[in-house]
Image (spheres, rainbow, N blue to C red):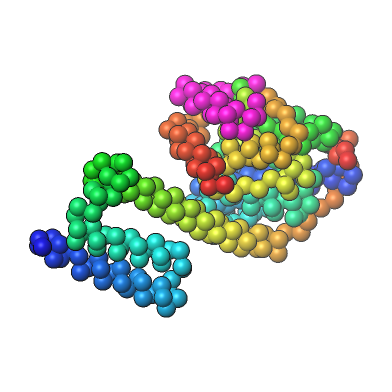
Amino acid sequence: MSHPGAPSQGRAKIAIVIPAYNEAPVIEDVLDRLGILGYHLVVVDDGSRDATAAKARRAGVVLVSHPINRGQGAALQTGITVALALGADVVVTFDADGQHDPADLPALVAPILTGECDVTLGSRFRGRAERMPLGRRVMLRAAVWFTWLTSSLRVSDTHNGLRAFSRSAAQRIRITMDGMAHASEILEEISALKLRWREVPVTVRYSEYSLAKGQRSSDGFRIAAQVLIEKLHR
Amino acid sequence: MTLFQLITFPIALAVGLRSAFRLLRGERHRLRGVLATLLWIAAAITILIPNATTEIANRLGIGRGTDLVTYLVALAFLWSWFYFHQKITRTARHVTDLSRALAVERALQQYPPFPPTPPKSSGPDLVD
């Protein structure tokens, strides 16, 4: 959104990176709710086949378009690269499916703005998870244990798309896993780079749309396998 | 010589010799060429002399020749799985890098840096 009222000039330029793939039914609503906060919005259209890009363009955001679909991890890295190139001081990642609450953003970026930490991670288990199915809850708990084993980060929530990075942290973290395993990779990067991090309570609202679009519980096994195979390759 | 040996031995030998010639002419990656040549020559020998695998297995303390072949096939399968997985992953990353380079270049041509705006009392400040 070309950013009237966006914080800058002695104030932080905060960019919200929103990876989107076939999100036409909800993208306008998500951008409307974010737009009124005055942040810089960067939408990465990840090769959508629907009207996602057209709707984002109409909303006046910075629109970055992958020519073909490469996955959410790839889209996030592209969005972060563009946000940094355009001068962002803080980069926030935000899902396009409407699960996140823009009202959580000030609390998420505050510890970075005060210099308290380099990365903040949204946690639905410290905050609220509305209408979360039991299968998803079990999968996410298992993912937390898995993360404890693989990255030694004691987080309460692993695959939450709401995070914030200081400029220097965003420059140092490299997301190489194109698919959903990027969430585990980011945590491993935070651990390996010894970045200062903190969890912030956030609200995640599951809807029929987001559940249909999001990961299946069985995807957890695939992601775990990808992370382990990647470790073998390194 | 059985019908199976009559059919498969010349094929394995021909492929092994072709692999060796290509290796000698420098048309192949050296390590992969040596491995492929050895594999086909070993296949030709075991087809011609079926007891050879049992002989080798006994010397290695494995027992039966079929067990030796099973172990080798399992190892070859694992190696090829890792090899192709790595290769596919590398190719996928190159495709992503290319897509990203195109997307970033177009975006940076289209959009100016985030504009400075007058400070607002309610907005967040950056602490250096």
Instruction: Describe residue B3's horizontal placement relative to residue A176 as left or right.
Output: left
Secondary structure mainly formed by the magenta segment:
helix
Residue B102 vs A36, above or below: the answer is below
Membership of A144 in magenta stretch: yes
- Residue B67 appears in view: no
Taking depth in this image into account, of B81 and A41 the one nearest to the observer is B81
How far across and how far down the image is residue A109, in percent?
76, 34
At horizontal 47% and vertical 38% (from top left) the residue drawn is A225
How far across and how far down the image is residue B19, in percent?
35, 70
How far across and how far down the image is residue A84, in percent?
74, 51
| Residue extending furthest toward the bottom | B25
| Residue extending furthest toward the front | B59
Instruction: Describe residue A175's horizontal placement relative to residue A206 as left or right.
Output: right
Instruction: Describe residue A127's horizontal placement relative to residue A49 as left or right.
Output: right
At horizontal 62% and vertical 33% (from top left) the residue drawn is A151
Q: Which span of residues is magenta-colored?
A: A126-154
Taking depth in this image into account, of A137 and A187 the one nearest to the observer is A187
- Residue A232 appears in view: yes
How far across and how far down the image is residue B109, in percent?
70, 64
Residue A30 vs A205, above or below: the answer is below
Taking depth in this image into account, of B122 and B68 the one nearest to the observer is B68
Q: Quadrant of residue B110?
A: bottom right
Instruction: Describe residue A168's horizontal placement relative to residue A78 as left or right.
Output: right
At horizontal 26% and vertical 59% (from top left) the residue drawn is B43
At horizontal 30% and vertical 63% (from top left) the residue drawn is B40
